[in-house]
Amino acid sequence: MTEPGDTRAALLAALRLQLDWGADEALAEATLDRTRPAAAAPPPPALLSAPPGAPLPRPSLVRGTQGSPVLPPAASRAAELAAAASTLEELREAMAGFEASPLRETATNLVFADGTPEAGLMLIGEAPGADEDRLGKPFVGASGQLLDRMFASIGLARETGFYITNILPFRPPGNRTPTDGEIALFLPFVLRHIALVKPRRLVLLGGVSAKALLRAKDGITRLRGRWLEVMIEAESTLPALATLHPAYLLRNPIAKRDAWADLLLLRRTLDGE
Ligand code: URA
């Protein structure tokens, strides 16, 4: 016969297992995407049985009467708010007041930026993790500590040498990879952030940041290690160096060799200016 104590022990063991697997929050991985226009909401059941190879619906852009793309309301609101910000503080306030992303509801804090806007060098990561969400600052957890050591090794510290932010200002639940929709929604804020900081150069940390800003399909291993151009506003571009994300380096220490080569390229470039 099962004793109440046995049930409790089994439940605790199951919970402990979940924690070991990284499930530290009672949240679903997928969030409701309220940025989609109602008409383009989830596909009807018939679509689920579409033949293999049939084109997927593209709900994020709808066509205007003249056939031109029209941004869905949340995306055009983001673009409007971002464009109206004329200082970093105004941009932070605009982002804090932007309610269209469900990530805002599961995050504890808006993570805006850290470091020195006047440094001329701006680093852009992916999205806050648990430590960043708790403290409201980017790159303060384990990968942030590695990042600080990496940049210190070429003589750059946050306090004087660089400014840092992320593509997403809110933590995705369970640290999952940001969706394309989330990235597209926050991109106007990131581009405005860069335009207001006016750095001379960008460093893109990891594939999410590199692909979003370079509008590239290639993965980070193809994009890293050379200066490329990021289009910030019409006719305005900035040199950007994509490199491996410190969180990836923590999992793959062998890749530190490539990251070191990228840092040396950055150092040489800055020395030559
Ligand atoms: N990883 C990121 O990309 N950004 C952070 O702020 C922390 C971890």
Image (cartoon, rainbow, N blue to C red):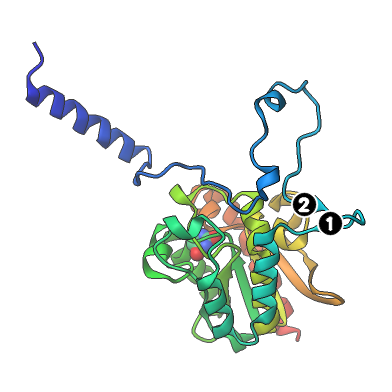
Please tell me whether residue 40 is drawn above or below residue 3 in the rendered image: below
* Image coords of residue 191 (percent x, y): 70, 72
Image quarter of residue 126? bottom right
* Image coords of residue 36 (percent x, y): 65, 50
Name the foreground residue: 177 vs 203: 177
The residue at which mark 1 appears reads as 69
The residue at which mark 2 appears reads as 61
Q: Amino acid at mark 2?
A: Leu
* Image coords of residue 214 (percent x, y): 76, 61
Please tell me whether residue 40 is drawn above or below residue 87 in the rendered image: above
At horizontal 59% and vertical 52% (from top left) the residue drawn is: 255
Name the foreground residue: 62 vs 227: 62
**Residue at the extreme right:** 66
Direction from residue 80 to residue 26 in the image, left or right: left
At horizontal 76% and vertical 43% (from top left) the residue drawn is: 58
Mark 1 neighbour density, 10 Å: few (under 14) some (14–19) many (20 or more): few
Question: Visible in this render: residue 222?
Answer: yes
Verify CB contact (< 8 Å) between mark 1 and mark 2. yes
Question: Visible in this render: residue 161?
Answer: no
**Residue at the extreme top:** 1
Mark linked to residue 140: none
Mark 2 neighbour density, 10 Å: few (under 14) some (14–19) many (20 or more): some
Identify the secondary structure beneath mark 1: strand
Mark 1 and mark 2 lie on one chain; the one further toward the N terminus is 2
* Image coords of residue 3 (percent x, y): 7, 19
Name the foreground residue: 153 vs 168: 168
Q: Amino acid at mark 1?
A: Pro
Identify the secondary structure beneath mark 2: loop
Please tell me whether residue 243 is drawn above or below residue 255 in the rendered image: below
Direction from residue 249 to residue 227 in the image, left or right: right
